[in-house]
Amino acid sequence: EQLAQAKGEATKQSCVDCHGAEGNAPIDVTYPKLGGQYGDYIAHALQAYRAGNRQHALMTPQAAQLSDQDISDLAAYFGSRSGQLRDLHGVD
């Protein structure tokens, strides 16, 4: 939780500044809800941003500063939050 609220050096923003409290209230409709997301998905996305394989004006520089442990911690934190996400199981 502390890391999710820490301001990144690259953008001067924290995760919750853009994705909202516990990752459930993004400030922009194009930003994903992170609360309740699969932790391995979050980790994979952050690793891709850090490596430069996935590009976003804010996320790429923000993730560049994250260690493997930071990514693991953020993935665990947001994955453990209650979320508003649902899968498409049973949706036609």
Image (tube, grey):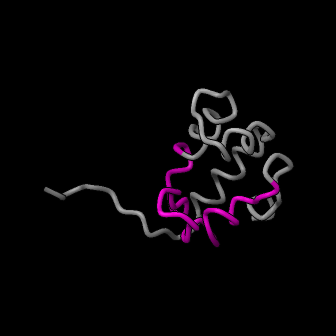
- 34 on left or right of 8: left
Quadrant hosting residue 67 = top right
Q: Magenta part of the protein: which range?
A: 12-41
Q: Residue furthest front?
A: 57
Residue 24: say if magenta: yes
Q: Residue at x 76, y 36 (%)?
A: 64
Compare residues 91 and 30 and report the one nearer the observer: 30
Considering only vertical position in the picture, is 61 above or below 38? above
Q: Position of residue 40 (x, y in %)?
A: 55, 43
Pick the quarter of the image with the N terminus: bottom right
- 65 on left or right of 41: right
Q: Residue furthest left?
A: 92
Q: Position of residue 66 (x, y in %)?
A: 78, 41
Dominant secondary structure of the magenta stretch? Answer: loop
Pick the quarter of the image with the C terminus: bottom left
Q: Residue at x 69, y 52 (%)?
A: 74
Q: How many marks?
A: 0
Quadrant hosting residue 59 = top right
Considering only vertical position in the picture, is 87 above or below 52? below
Q: Residue at x 49, y 68 (%)?
A: 83
Residue 35: say if magenta: yes
- 74 on left or right of 39: right
Q: Position of residue 78 (x, y in %)?
A: 61, 59
Quadrant hosting residue 88 = bottom left
Considering only vertical position in the picture, is 50 above or below 85? above
Compare residues 8 and 68 and report the one nearer the observer: 8
Q: Residue furthest right?
A: 9
